[in-house]
Image (cartoon, rainbow, N blue to C red):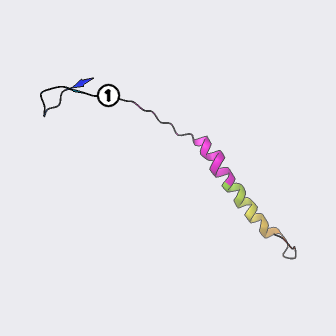
Amino acid sequence: NEKFYTCCDEPYLDITFNITLRRKTLFYTVNIIIPCMGISFLTVLTFYLPSDSGEK
């Protein structure tokens, strides 16, 4: 492609790229949200253990 700019008389060559990006929302849900919810659920379950048990 040749493009003429207002400042100069000679044409300049340029290359035009079109890049399309798409976000994968299922990737974030499976790899971040679900494990965080699982760890939070297990953390809450530790409060249901009796205090007499040796290990938590």
- The residue at 32%/28% (across/down) is 15
Q: From the viewer's perspective, is 37 left or right of 54?
A: left
Secondary element type, mark 1: loop
Q: From the viewer's perspective, is 12 left or right of 49?
A: left
Which residue is under mark 1? Answer: 15
Q: Is residue 18 magenta?
A: yes
- The residue at 78%/67% (across/down) is 46
Label 1 crowd (10 A; few <14 / some 14-19 / many >=20): few
In the displayed structure, would residue 37 be above or below residue 2?
below
Could you say where residue 20 lies in the image, as x and y percent from the top left? 45, 33
In the displayed structure, would residue 9 be above or below residue 52?
above
Quarter of image, res 54: bottom right
- The residue at 47%/36% (across/down) is 21
Could you say where residue 2 lies in the image, as x and y percent from the top left? 24, 23
Q: Which residues are magenta?
A: 17-35
Q: Is residue 32 magenta?
A: yes
Q: Looking at the image, which residue sits at the far top? A: 1
Quarter of image, res 4: top left
Under mark 1, the amino acid is Ile
State which quarter of the image contains the C terminus.
bottom right
- The residue at 73%/59% (across/down) is 41
40 and 55: which is toward the camera: 55
Q: From the viewer's perspective, is 32 left or right of 38?
A: left
In the displayed structure, would residue 22 be above or below residue 30?
above
